[in-house]
Image (spheres, rainbow, N blue to C red):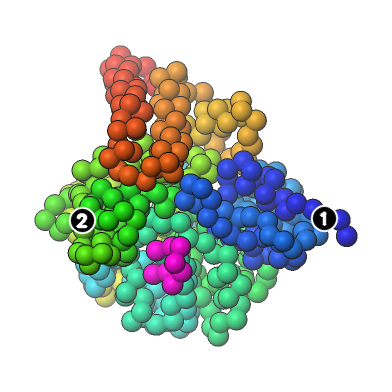
Amino acid sequence: MSLLKPLVLTKVVEHDLCIGCGACISVCPSKALDITWNNYGFLVAQANENRCDNDGACLNVCPFNTEPNESYQNEDGLAIQYLSGVPLYHPKIGHYNSLYAGYSHKHRESSSSGGIGTYIYEKLFDLGIIKHVVTVGDSNKPDAHYQYKVVSSKEELLTISKTRYHPVTLATVLTEIKELDGDVAISGVGCFIKAIRLAQNNDPSLKEKIKFLVGIICGGVKSTFFTEYLADKAGATSNQFSNPEYRVKDPESTASDYGFSCIDNPTKIRKIIKMRQVGDMWGSGLFKANACDFCDDVTTELADISLGDAWLSPYDQDGRGHNVAVSRSNIADQILQQGLISGELELEELSQESFLASQQGSFNHRHDGINTRIEMVKRIGMATPPTRVMPTPLPFYLQLVQKARRCTRAKSLQIWALHKNSIVFDKNMKLEKLKLKVITKLSHVIRRAKSSIGIKS
């Protein structure tokens, strides 16, 4: 047997495209891969001492596969398999039954947004469709605040109904669920949901076992540095904190006026900071994974239901939270309709235009700018996964925005890795963030000027 290097390393990890989903670990026949933390606070695949004797099983389940073979399917091909019979389609939304904005009366207060995700899980339990939920909860590992865990009761589910902007992995979970008594539902962001669908194609037992997927509409996977930075800004003792909460709602304010909190371990005092005090952490790309710049699945197209925040008036004016929900399977639609009829859910149907507007910022960045970013990394010899977005040349001023965001993203990771101090970080990032702000404002001025004289940007 020849000693091979796992292909997922040479085709994905070495191009800084590993998102840490861990699907490759679960399918590796020679157990030659582990998941580990890299120097920038991300979980990535890594070779271990075992011999790699396979020719690419790991690559076939990777959502960022840079060299897919003919049998590998993208979101469009996988949707035909797993969402067959769904009546509606939009190239930015994917296949779907219905679009909604709303919330769960019971779960809204304890959730990061509208609580519809927790409601869906509760009903899946009630209907006997599942016996377990695989979702992100508190970690029992010393090197992580959160991890994927198996929840087997509605009562336990209520303790973990929060958004976690923290790296996690499915590396062991995909193997563990095969041993569970009963079927499961799993939550995840778009790339993780895609990895699960690819793993189901690879292993029929997973296709049988996994009955429902809840997709989280994602603005980008953050490094652990994101959590460390916010904790430091909130006043926690240097890297001695626990229980980070990323979406502390203010019912008296707007949906975007949320805070971050954590427990300062030496004092046991809860520290909190409003996110508006730290500036734009999403549009600037701070602490974001490189792979996210080459993902064109904005709405988690392969899930049974996709849930996000309703960044749309009037919903975004309510600090208690609203979800947008994209129903993509008959089960999801039935649960939502029954919730509406029973009064357990407050739902309003959205038009395509309204839903697209609720995620417009993500579409602008992820779709409109993706080809510019691809060209940028190709010039330095790095590979990218195939995308479905047709090449559209951006005007120079929007190309500058993309370049500035890429620089800001990379520098944020480099600076925090060196200093791990929010004061030093803010000082060192000040010029980079200022350049991005000026370039972005200039692009807005140019776009408005062009629009006023009837020229499309």
Q: Nearer the viewer, residue 163 or 89?
A: 163
Q: Nearer the viewer, residue 352 or 26?
A: 26
Q: Position of residue 373 (x, y in %)?
A: 52, 31
Which residue is painted at 45% across and 18% down in the image? 396
| Magenta-tinted stretch | 138-145
Which residue is painted at 63% across and 61% down in the image? 34
Which residue is painted at 32% across and 64% down in the image? 242
Residue highlighted by disc 1 = 3
Quadrant for the C terminus, please.
top left
Residue 110: in magenta span: no
- Classify mark 2: residues with Cα within 10 Å, few (<14), some (14-19) or many (20+): many
Specify the amino acid type for callout 1. Leu
Image disc number at residue 159: none
Disc 2 is placed on an element classified as strand
Direction from residue 179 to residue 27 in the image, left or right: right
Magenta segment main secondary structure: loop
- Classify mark 1: residues with Cα within 10 Å, few (<14), some (14-19) or many (20+): few
Q: Give the Cα separation between the discs numbered 1 and 2.
A: 51 Å
Quadrant for the N terminus, please.
bottom right
Specify the amino acid type for callout 2. Ile
Q: Is residue 287 above or below residue 227?
A: above
Quarter holding residue 26: bottom right
Disc 1 is placed on an element classified as loop
Which residue is painted at 52% across and 55% down in the image? 37
Residue highlighted by disc 2 = 272
Residue 144: in magenta span: yes
